[in-house]
Image (cartoon, rainbow, N blue to C red):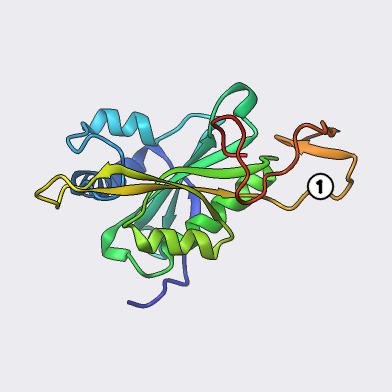
Amino acid sequence: MNVIHAMLIRDAMPDDWAAIWPFLRRIVAAGETYCYDRNLAEEQARRLWLLEPPGRTVVAVDADHAVLGTAKMHANQGGPGAHVATASFMVDPQHGGRGVGRALGEHVLAWARAQGYRAMQFNAVVETNTGAVALWRSLGFKILATVPAAFITQCTATSGCTSCTVICECPPPPTNPDMETYRGLSRVKNPDMSPCREGERGNGGTF
């Protein structure tokens, strides 16, 4: 399929849900990429996907204003973990392989950097979702850990499991080595909060 060049990524509006729900329902029901209930009800799905600020949900649309895909982004955790972002993505399967996922990924990374997040972490990328894993790695993400048998696929009659992959993207360090940016605010760097490096982990954390 050809890459879609005339693509706009904008904030999702309530009226976009009618276009999002059919492919979101199809992806969730397939049970191959998301840790959502495969019988997820529409109203619950709407609450999960269309976020209120400070979270954000966007859609990618073509020149005819058709919704091609969508992404939601927010802090991965609260409190001491609020400096790390996370995001989720859904691309209409009819438009897969046309650059929609990459465009959404680049947009979300730019948003996270602009908001001052220190990193972005994807908590559960299914290992067999090889297209997504390859895309995130091409955008600079690093695989920090793989949890064996953490995801049961729907297509395996023996309830075989694949793995979830945790990915983290570390933005460049601040220009001033004595300062850091935290959610858009500059402050004196805490020496105990160094940027993450591949392979490092704290007590049960990612960094």
Total number of numbered discs in the rendering: 1
In screen coordinates, is 184 left or right of 29?
Answer: right
Q: Amino acid at mark 1?
A: Pro
- Residue at horizontal 70 percent and vertical 34 percent from the top: 183
Indicate the secondary structure of the residue bearing disc 1: loop
In this view, which residue lies farthest toward the bottom?
2
Q: Is residue 172 above or below residue 193?
A: below
Instruction: Point out the image quarter for the N terminus.
Output: bottom left
In front: 61, or 157? 157
Label 1 crowd bin: few (<14), some (14–19), many (20+), radius 10 Å: some
In front: 100, or 188? 188
- Residue at horizontal 32 percent and vertical 33 percent from the top: 46
In screen coordinates, is 100 left or right of 85?
Answer: left
In front: 179, or 100? 179
| Quarter holding residue 63 | bottom left
Question: Residue 31 in the image: x percent, y percent?
Answer: 22, 46
Question: Residue 8 in the image: x percent, y percent?
Answer: 49, 59
Give the residue number, with chain letter if any, for mark 1: 174
Instruction: Point out the image quarter for the C terminus.
Output: top right
- Residue at horizontal 84 percent and vertical 34 percent from the top: 189
In this view, which residue lies farthest toward the left?
157
Q: Is residue 114 above or below residue 100?
A: above
- Residue at horizontal 19 percent and vertical 38 percent from the top: 38
Q: Is residue 54 above or below residue 9?
A: above
Question: Residue 96 in the image: x percent, y percent?
Answer: 32, 65
Question: Residue 124 in the image: x percent, y percent?
Answer: 40, 43
| Quarter holding residue 181 | top right
